[in-house]
Image (cartoon, grey):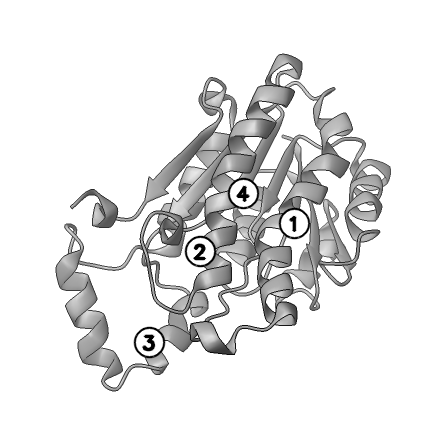
Amino acid sequence: MGVVLIVGGAPGLGQLAVERFRAAGDDVLLVDENAPARGLDEADARGGFAFVQGDLLDPSLAPLAATRAVENFGSIDTLLVTASLGTGAPLADWTPDLWDRSVGINLKMPFFFAQAAAPHLAVSANPCILFLSSTASLRGQAGAHGFQAAKAGLSGLVRSLAAELGPQGVRVNALLPGWIDTPFNNSFWEAQPQPVAARAAMDGRIPLRRHGAPNEVVETILFLASPAGAYISGTALVVDGGFTAV
């Protein structure tokens, strides 16, 4: 069992990760801008779960969350950042505020949570940092400028953190999900003229001919956070059914 600090627990991968880590016996401190999804708050009654609410771009939130995790559970063994912001707009419509929020949530925020957690991870027997990125960092998509730039930057951040924290035993990785069946992608499909046909066409381009299931990503997260992933660091692991390979 370990202590997991999870940033982002909205319905989808973040919520499922909380549930799976708790089911495995890990203590979890969840950080999010919104109250926990229904069911997660009930875990508090069983112990081993705590929640910190705040603005993810508030510079005081990461140190506060790291301190709270150690106060509640004694350590931090895994930092998992799942929070993402998939803002999209034509080039002419991007404003400085839109850019700053997109890059802030997708790149700046993960860095400062890693900074806050690093001293605690350095004394763990199984320390791990995991960032949830996207195959958008590997492929171009019109309008997704801030999101794609930030996710590409996240891959670079993984490499620099792996280089600096590796001598302390801390491994750092990113997961790059492709088309996963979560609410995060709903707005994209709803914006298509024919959503059902558009999704079917996309599935036809994926070698495995389907969207991924959320648990297929979360099981990979649990593997990388476990001792079985002890020699994997500095990498961006693609989980996309072969989409970016063809």
Task: Give above or below for 133 relative to 96.
Answer: above
Q: x%, y% of residue 159?
A: 52, 29
Residue positioned 33% across, 53% down in the render = 178
Residue 232 visible to an observer of this rendering: yes
Marks 4 and 1 sit apart, C-alpha to C-alpha, by 12 Å
Q: Which residue is mark 1?
A: 108
Given this view, does label 3 or label 2 mark the residue nearer the observer?
2
Residue under label 2: 148
Q: Earlier in the sequence, mark 4 or mark 3?
A: 4
Label 1 is placed on what type of residue? Lys
What residue type is disc 4 on?
Phe
Which residue is at a point 52% across and 52% down the rendered structure image? Answer: 150
> Which structural element holds mark 4?
strand
**C-beta proximity under 8 Å, tags 4 and 1:** no
Ranked by sequence position, the earlier of labels 1 and 2 is: 1
Q: CA distance from mark 1 to mark 2?
A: 14 Å
> Which of the two residues, 103 or 57, is positioned nearer the viewer here?
103
Of the pair 60 and 122, the residue shown nearer to us: 60
Q: Is residue 225 visible?
A: no
N-terminal-most mark, 3 or 2: 2
The residue under label 3 is 189
> Of label 1 and label 3, which has the lower sequence position?
1
Counting residues from the start of the chain, the first of labels 4 and 2 encountered is 4
